[in-house]
Amino acid sequence: MIRKPYTSTEPRVSVVIPTLPANDHEGVVAALRNQTMTDFEVLVVDDAEMNICEARNAGIEAATADTIALTDDDCRPPHDWVAQAAEALSEDEETICVEGAVQGGRTYHGEGLYVGCNLVFDRETALSAGGFDSEYAGWRDDTEFGWRMESHGICRYDPNLLMYHPDRTRARIDAEKEARLRREYPNRYRERIVPQTAVGKVNDWLWRRGFWDTVDRVRYAGGRR
């Protein structure tokens, strides 16, 4: 189910929030009602039958604005977040994806990992790129989406695009999806994840000793993904 708790006549930005019936999303909607900019819409995709990637894609497809601003149901956008999102893609025509900073229970400062709770992108480009890949649902889906978007235009970090994430992230490490990301994007993985995270450093240590090569040969024998 997709609801629009806030909308305007000609929205410049479509804010997409994937959630579940069991989750509280009233706080993020209340924060969005109190924005300095008013010409935007909010799409809450509230469906227990969808994974997070399916929910995000449904919101993107239903959106009416050219600019999509993505956040999560446990976040609190500052008063100027939508305005910053609108500005992020208007600076030049070649920019198609902008990642922002995150503060609070989770912190992020733009390491090219495209954290999904604070991500702005061009709707048509995202649809052309195939949207979010459900094979990564729940772990690295946002990172994989951002890395794929990089082949379609300029993707950059904007520190002025700030999101508050009050609580610790609910995501849990999925070793198989982590290995898949490393296998499908080896250069970006080595450049961006290995220096930033403990799991990346452990994976790199195993990788350099041939462990993951052996695992991949067994797991993906015969072309199985």
Image: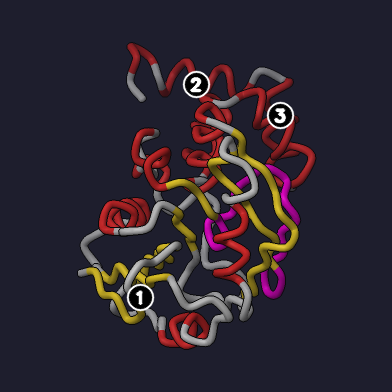
What residue sits right under mark 3 in the picture?
Answer: 190
Q: What residue is rendered at 36% in x and 25% in y?
A: 225
Give percent across and percent down for residue 151: 53, 27
Between discs 3 and 1, the one toward the N terminus: 1
State the separation of the CA atoms marked 3 and 2. 17 Å
By secondary structure, the bulk of the magenta-drawn segment is best described as: loop
Give percent across and percent down for residue 38: 47, 78
Local crowd size for mark 1, using a 10 Å CA cut-off: few (<14), some (14–19), many (≥20): few
Local crowd size for mark 2, using a 10 Å CA cut-off: few (<14), some (14–19), many (≥20): some
Viewer-nearest of discs 3 and 1: 1
Tag 3: amino acid: Arg
Q: Farthest residue in the top direction?
A: 222
For mark 1, give the secondary structure: loop
Q: Which mark is residue 216?
A: 2
Q: Is residue 203 above or below residue 63?
A: above
Local crowd size for mark 3, using a 10 Å CA cut-off: few (<14), some (14–19), many (≥20): some
Q: Are marks 3 and 1 in contact (CB under 8 Å)?
A: no
Tag 1: amino acid: Ser
* Magenta segment: 103-119
What residue sits right under mark 1 in the picture?
Answer: 8
Q: What residue is rendered at 70% in x and 75% in y?
A: 104
Q: What residue is rendered at 40% in x and 63% in y?
A: 14
* Left or right of 206 in this view: 13: left
Tag 2: amino acid: Asp
Between discs 3 and 2, the one toward the N terminus: 3
Between discs 2 and 1, the one toward the N terminus: 1
Based on the picture, tell me whether residue 190 belongs to the magenta stretch.
no
State the separation of the CA atoms marked 3 and 1. 43 Å
